Amino acid sequence: MNEKRTDLAAEARDLWRESAGAGVLPDGVAADTETVGGYTVETLRVLDERGAEALGKPVGTYITVELGELLAKEEGAFARGAELLASRLRSLLGPDRNADVLVAGLGNSAITPDDLGPRSADYVLATRHLTESLPEHFGFLRRVSVVKTGVCGVTGVESAEMVRALVSALRPSAVIAVDALASRRLGRVCRTVQLSDAGIIPGSGVGNSRAELSLRTLSVPVIAVGVPTVVDAATLAADLAEMANIGKFDSEDFGSFGRSMIVTPREIDARIEDISKLIGYALNLALQDELSVADITQLLS
Amino acid sequence: MNEKRTDLAAEARDLWRESAGAGVLPDGVAADTETVGGYTVETLRVLDERGAEALGKPVGTYITVELGELLAKEEGAFARGAELLASRLRSLLGPDRNADVLVAGLGNSAITPDDLGPRSADYVLATRHLTESLPEHFGFLRRVSVVKTGVCGVTGVESAEMVRALVSALRPSAVIAVDALASRRLGRVCRTVQLSDAGIIPGSGVGNSRAELSLRTLSVPVIAVGVPTVVDAATLAADLAEMANIGKFDSEDFGSFGRSMIVTPREIDARIEDISKLIGYALNLALQDELSVADITQLLS
Amino acid sequence: MNEKRTDLAAEARDLWRESAGAGVLPDGVAADTETVGGYTVETLRVLDERGAEALGKPVGTYITVELGELLAKEEGAFARGAELLASRLRSLLGPDRNADVLVAGLGNSAITPDDLGPRSADYVLATRHLTESLPEHFGFLRRVSVVKTGVCGVTGVESAEMVRALVSALRPSAVIAVDALASRRLGRVCRTVQLSDAGIIPGSGVGNSRAELSLRTLSVPVIAVGVPTVVDAATLAADLAEMANIGKFDSEDFGSFGRSMIVTPREIDARIEDISKLIGYALNLALQDELSVADITQLLS
Amino acid sequence: MNEKRTDLAAEARDLWRESAGAGVLPDGVAADTETVGGYTVETLRVLDERGAEALGKPVGTYITVELGELLAKEEGAFARGAELLASRLRSLLGPDRNADVLVAGLGNSAITPDDLGPRSADYVLATRHLTESLPEHFGFLRRVSVVKTGVCGVTGVESAEMVRALVSALRPSAVIAVDALASRRLGRVCRTVQLSDAGIIPGSGVGNSRAELSLRTLSVPVIAVGVPTVVDAATLAADLAEMANIGKFDSEDFGSFGRSMIVTPREIDARIEDISKLIGYALNLALQDELSVADITQLLS
């Protein structure tokens, strides 16, 4: 198993290739790349324990969408990106279009790069109460509930406990968890979305299995939606050192020093806002077949 | 039973007296008034169903603290007010100083006068995770978890359902619910705190019993902390009309018109902030015997 | 001159009529009402000192647009309302489409109903720096600068002084000042926009002439854009008392008590946001002939 | 002159020493280091054009205070740090304790690390209006006005123009400008404060002399207060590469790529809040001889 950590399966694959060689894949892993409307979509399938061991990622499907120029605000780019993400979310959610869903925005809204989950949740239409109280008007909507879990330091409750409590009470047929990730490459920050059915560990994997949100721990499917919003300063150092052909650079040298510092885009506040809105719209499109981008804008206002 | 509604038991008593006469009390109701450090504290006990019927309030104890001049920012007024509220909260919480407590901030943080509950929750120290992960350092603290329930329109989940889910999962021995109330008198707005062990109906009692938070619905004691932050415009009209000796004024004439409008202090944003901070500190003092006002300031920063 | 105060010329006219009789107008005042796309637009012209004396308003033109159902979010209502306001603003701004303009958002952003001016300013496109630094790309835009004056208690500087300083430095050919107003009628709150070329006294006219923003004090034309966002509690009492046929009600009875309390819509936070956005768009449409609603949305994002 | 840029004079001196050797100073530069209450205070004096040329900094005094452990929240650390900064600010402000001062918070409040100036301004007591309107009560206070200049993209007006306009109108005898800086070293981020009488170029010195705020451009003394809140990602790369003994690393290789990314502490939101509060209190202590830390807390609440 690889010692270097990353939240992105595609980066775990790249790290594996550093020793195994470019272009090859571990046993138990399948990959597929396509281009859709100008965006690159890569689907990585961790098929069995061999693949999970090699990449350090649980068995499941990981879809990486490179939005790159999306945020260039070109005409229609927002709608195309949201539709693309929605189509992939639908494939992970499965065929039952009426199943209840709980959307959980994970992360600390008081830390800008960690506000992705809560801010995305702001853009998701909660419909569960409407379908119950006014079925004649809203019966056509899928029942969606939306929660921001907050952070342990503020609530005294782990995000995973909070979600588990709501799953027990509301009995959704699936959970969608949105969280900020860490990446190894600057170029992916606020530009890449990873969708997965393999669950998620809030707070970027401290290795605390109690905290895991997955089919195994919640007994319902968990779709994870993540966006890298930072790079560790120590990871960046290695990254830049390689680009400059300085040779290998051991990020462990920096220990807690480098790890207490992060690298973000200068305009991280605006970037988090933009990508959170995109994710919120994509979730609405994926969950509510009847709604268009314009409908969502109307309903959110 | 009285037709005029109020969230304050003391006002329900006043309304009852309008027909019954000043100074008397219904059967099944006991009252007691004291002055503590310049503040008036009134304890009203609804003892049985006769009292509940007469006042339109469930059986239980209702403590009304008139802070009045507290907010005048006189030296030490904040600490004295917080200590006074804490002492009364302790009497409602009962003798077990180690029991777990769940604090729930109810209300809509996007509507200023309804932000009292969420804002108060911001000032409550969540300790449950600390006592679990670092018992050697924090074992002396009572285990407290803190949740903001949000509102149904945003989450799809009723506040009461959210609290019930967390009670099932966390098994606290009591719930403290903080919520904004409506008053009938301008003079009480942002100046009066009502503490009660009779539970609470979030959103100012729409009469929906599913939504009730009480010992009956949650199977653990529920301490309600409420502050009137608004007066209905229609209620004000009657209030002012009486002051001007115009005679009786039927607030029902205004129907939904008057009820869609509220009366608040001009500086409601600052007043909500001030009183929420006071309530948060009072909760911390009541729950954590070891902490002083200065300790809390340090821990919150 | 009338003793009852109001920030709206149309209400001053109504007050005058209370003694003079319905349907008549003072000498020196002309009025004109039209309906445009479902909205009522009333133009009141105070022609000379007789009119100014009668209404307690300076000589000038006052255009009152009743948006009423606009905020009902019916299809296209936002764009129609913005275009209507823009057309009237253009008529007040005069024919020179290239003249520099300074937009001033007046009011205290920490007090929700007083945040109208600052929040509207957030929606106005500042272009002055672009036309200077990149004339080849942005030369087609009118030069607009945007300032939020803040409040005296925070800055130590009166709003009028702040605007005067910027007028001296930037030499705009007109000032547009946006401010929250007080109304006498609940039905106008957050639903009526008053446009005027007669200047404005920030903070709802304390009668301090030093504070006036007008052609007289700034030597450039001042277009005032105002929206009533509150009613004095005391004024409401009189209003409601009349509706209930209780007879005359003297709001002076309540003195500082009633005046420290305000009446607002329950959802004032959302209403201020909606109407501020409308005003911001209307200003952009009025100032920049080349831009559509869609262009503005794109440029603001 | 050195090609590598930094906003800190102490770093410019370090860069100069890279070629000249440790421990020496350029001609025309004097340095002095002392330790006060556990904090290191370094005073660098650029005495003439030789020094200015060598360090790339204008003639003037630069005081660098390393707060380091201040933010560790040890008992009394906040007050000691604020007093220390205040004493050095007083030395730069000169002996006239009654002179009017304009405090300008520079920077973009929508970008967290650039919010230092505006957020510090929130903590500065504006007194000018009080001393004018209520001299009998507030005559003992120095007259202070406070402005947040905003950013050009939002206002259409350069920060320097805005300050110049207010200097012309208000005629203060000095300007204090607070702005976020860029540092070359992670260890200084949110821990070092630079005070200077040599003026400031808002936005970290784009070399645009029109934008300079200084005695030369404003005709009144300008005291600059700056705190490094970010490190360029490219600068960090070089920094880390040297620490790892990889050898020289040319940050220019990364061009606009590295410069669009910044390195900040993970908890930058909280750190900006803490250091802004410290600076605000230090300014109040320096400007108002009569006020203590406790007085300021009272007056700000």
Image (cartoon, coloured by chain):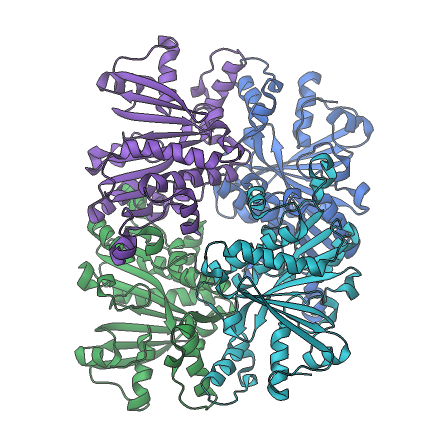
Chain colours: A green, B purple, C blue, D cyan
Residue B126: x and y in percent read 33, 49
At x 51%, y 81%, the residue is D239
Q: Is residue B30 above or below residue B116?
A: above
At x 38%, y 84%, the residue is A250
Residue B131: x and y in percent read 27, 53
Q: Is residue A39 left or right of residue C214?
A: left
Q: Is residue A189 left or right of residue D188?
A: left
Q: Is residue B251 left or right of residue A174?
A: right
Residue D184, picture quadrant: bottom right
Residue A209, picture quadrant: bottom left
Which residue is nearer to you in this view: A74 or D170?
D170
Q: Is residue A153 left or right of residue D232?
A: left
Residue A44, picture quadrant: bottom left
At x 22%, y 59%, the residue is A96
Q: Is residue A92 above or below residue A141?
A: below
Residue B221: x and y in percent read 23, 35
Residue A106: x and y in percent read 34, 59
Q: Is residue D28 above or below residue C148?
A: below
At x 69%, y 78%, the residue is D56
